[in-house]
Amino acid sequence: MSKNKNRPDQDGTHRLAFERNKKRIYATQTVCGICGKPVDFSLKYPHPLSACIDHIVPIAKGGHPSDMANLQLAHWCCNRQKSDRLLRPQSGGEQAQTVAPRQLPQSCDWAAYRSR
């Protein structure tokens, strides 16, 4: 079994719907769905705080690749840290926690990051 299989949101089967929904999210959302902080759209990849789209339920865990209900705005570094884990919602307006074997602290102050 090859690990280099393309994901449905990248290989064409859901690509158009994903791109259309990505544009809607970029036009309507301004806060990272993972950390809850504002996203600065002037920052471009590979900056860690650049905008990207997160699959709430990861594709690897059975999440839909292009459904609007499964997509949210996120910082690139937040999305990478979440990886293919699920978030456990908190009550009372608290921030969601990642369901994972262990929680790792942030290793870098990304707000001070400067690309070369």
Image (spheres, grey):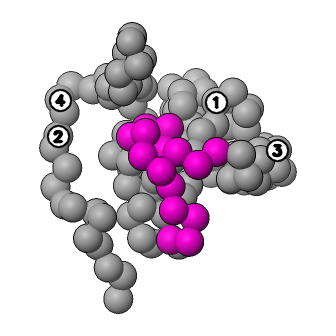
In the picture provided, is 27 more to the left or to the right than 46?
right
The secondary structure that dominates the magenta segment is loop
Q: Which of the 4 image quarters holds residue 85? A: top left
Q: Residues within 10 Å of mark 2 (few under 14, many from 20)?
A: few
Looking at the rendered structure, which numbered label has been put on residue 104? 2
Q: Are marks 2 and 1 in contact (CB under 8 Å)?
A: no
User: Is the Cβ of the residue at disc 1 closer than 8 Å to that at disc 3?
Assistant: no
Q: Which callout, 4 or 3, points at the residue further toward the start of the chain? A: 3
Going by the numbered disc 2, the residue's amino acid type is: Leu
- Reply yes or no: does residue 91 show up in magenta: no
The structure residue drawn at horizontal position 16% and vertical position 55%, both measured from the top left corner, is 107
Residue at image coords 38%, 55%: 77
How far apart are labels 1 and 3 at the CA level?
12 Å
Figure quadrant of residue 57: top right
Which residue is labeled 4 in the image? 102
Secondary structure type for disc 2 = loop
Disc 3: CA contacts within 10 A as few (<14), some (14-19) or many (>=20) = some
Task: Kindly identify which numbered label has been placed on residue 13.
Answer: none
In space, the residues marked 4 and 2 are separated at their CA atoms by 6 Å
**Spatial separation of the CA atoms under disc 4 and disc 1:** 24 Å
What range of the chain is rendered magenta?
29-43
Check if mark 4's residue and mark 2's residue have beta carbons within 8 Å.
Answer: yes
The mark found on residue 17 in the picture is 3
Q: Is residue 55 left or right of residue 83?
A: right
For the residue pair 111 and 85, the one nearer the viewer reads as 111
| Residue 70 circle label | 1
Residue 48 vertical placement versus 5 (above, below): below
Q: Nearer the viewer, residue 24 or 93?
A: 93
The image shows residue 55 at horizontal and vertical percentages of 57, 37
